[in-house]
Structure formats: C-alpha cells, structure tokens
Image (cartoon, rainbow, N blue to C red):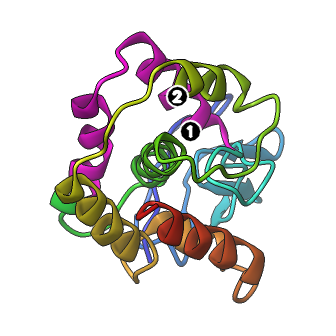
Amino acid sequence: MCCQLRLVAECSRIQCIDNCRQLVLIGTMTRVYSVGLAVIRNNIATPGGNMGAWAEDALGNDAACDWISLFLRDPQLRTIGKPISAVLCARGCIPVDTACNCLAACEVIARLQGQWGLKNSYSRELDSWIESNPIVVPDALKKSADSAIDKILGPDSELAELWDEGGYNETWHDSVADLQQRIFG
C-alpha cells in the first residue's frame, strides 16, 4: 500500500511512519482532519481521506480539473504526453495526483478522436476546445496511454488503492476500462 500526508494543521510534533496501513502520528490533534490521502482520528491516520473526487470518471476530481486547465493553457501533444510519461516512469507507488492527471490526459486523447466520455460542466471548456481544434493522436501516444492505464490499475497505484479501499469499486474500474477502450478510437 502507498500513501502520503500533504498537510496537517493545528498539530505539533508530528511523526509519520509511512507504511500506509497505519500512520502513527505523535502530536496533538484538536479536530478530525482530512489530509491528502489519509484521515486523522485520535492521532492515527488511515488511508482514504478526501482526495477531491466527486465522481468515478476521469474528470471527476480536483487534480484532473487542474490538469485540464494546464492543458488548455498549452494545448499540445507533448502536454498530453507528460502525465502519461510520469506514470510510465514512476518507480514504486504512483501518487494519486499523477494517476489522476494521466487519466485526464487519456480522456483528452479519447475526446480528440470523437470518443466522448461524460460531458458536463467540468468538461465544457475542454469539449469546446476539442471541437474547434482537431488534433491527430499518434498511435505511439495511444499505446503509451494504454500502458499507463494498466499501471494505474495495478498494485502500485494509490488511486486504485483508494477507490478499492472498501472493496472492489466496480463503477470506477468500469469507467477506467471504458476510457481505456476509447483511447484507441
């Protein structure tokens, strides 16, 4: 298992043992905090904190929406390739945001080929840009995206770990499988 703590407020003298099954915090907690990928209660942090997700689709989380904003500021194939490469080059655990960014990039690949996923307010600006700016996606980028999705679904993925924390999350896995099919057009 993998995880990390990103922010802890109102705590003193915190020590983390990052084995993710049980992160032991030495310090004082005045409230329950959601920090990065863990929830802290009674000085024990457990995986499964608020990862900023509201839906199982590739664009249903804060990291993906932030990445889409970056892409729209620099809408090029190399921008799409960066998060895919980050997953493919990851050693050990793939951090949640890295995986979310990669899935967002894969969603862009699918949409560039007319393989639309869920269209909603979170995808509106991206969808409008794609409709006005057709780009041919090279086969090599599609294959890299496919391999990256395989890694995200694997045992070294914090994102898969979080979605499956309460048991196999069929909705999330189906959404990712659908995306993986759509990247090939």
Left or right of 184 on screen, residue 127 = right
Residue 103 tag number? none
Q: Residues within 10 Å of mark 1 (few under 14, many from 20)?
A: many
Residue 68 tag number? 2
The single residue placed furthest to the top in the displayed view is 73
Q: Nearer the viewer, residue 126 or 62?
A: 126
Residue 90 visible in the picture:
no
Give the image location of residue 158, x and y in percent.
Answer: 48, 66
Left or right of 42 on screen, residue 102 = left
What secondary structure is marked by label 2? helix
The quadrant of the image that shows the N terminus is bottom left
Q: Nearer the viewer, residue 8 or 85?
A: 85
Q: What residue do we see at 64% from left, 21% from top?
A: 128
Q: What residue do we see at 58% from left, 53% from top?
A: 115
User: Are discs 1 and 2 less than 8 Å apart at CB?
Assistant: yes
Q: What residue do we see at 32% from left, 65% from top?
A: 148
Q: Identify the amino acid type marked 1.
A: Ala
The single residue placed furthest to the bottom in the displayed view is 167
Give the image location of residue 48, x and y in percent.
Answer: 68, 64
Give the image location of residue 57, x and y in percent.
Answer: 69, 56
What secondary structure is marked by label 1? helix
Which residue is labeled 1 in the image? 64
| 81 vs 126: above or below | below
Task: Provide the residue span drawn in magenta.
Answer: 61-87
Q: Residues within 10 Å of mark 2 (few under 14, many from 20)?
A: many
Left or right of 139 on screen, residue 95 = right
Q: Identify the amino acid type marked 2.
A: Ile
Q: Nearer the viewer, residue 139 or 62?
A: 139
What is the tally of numbered marks visible in this picture? 2
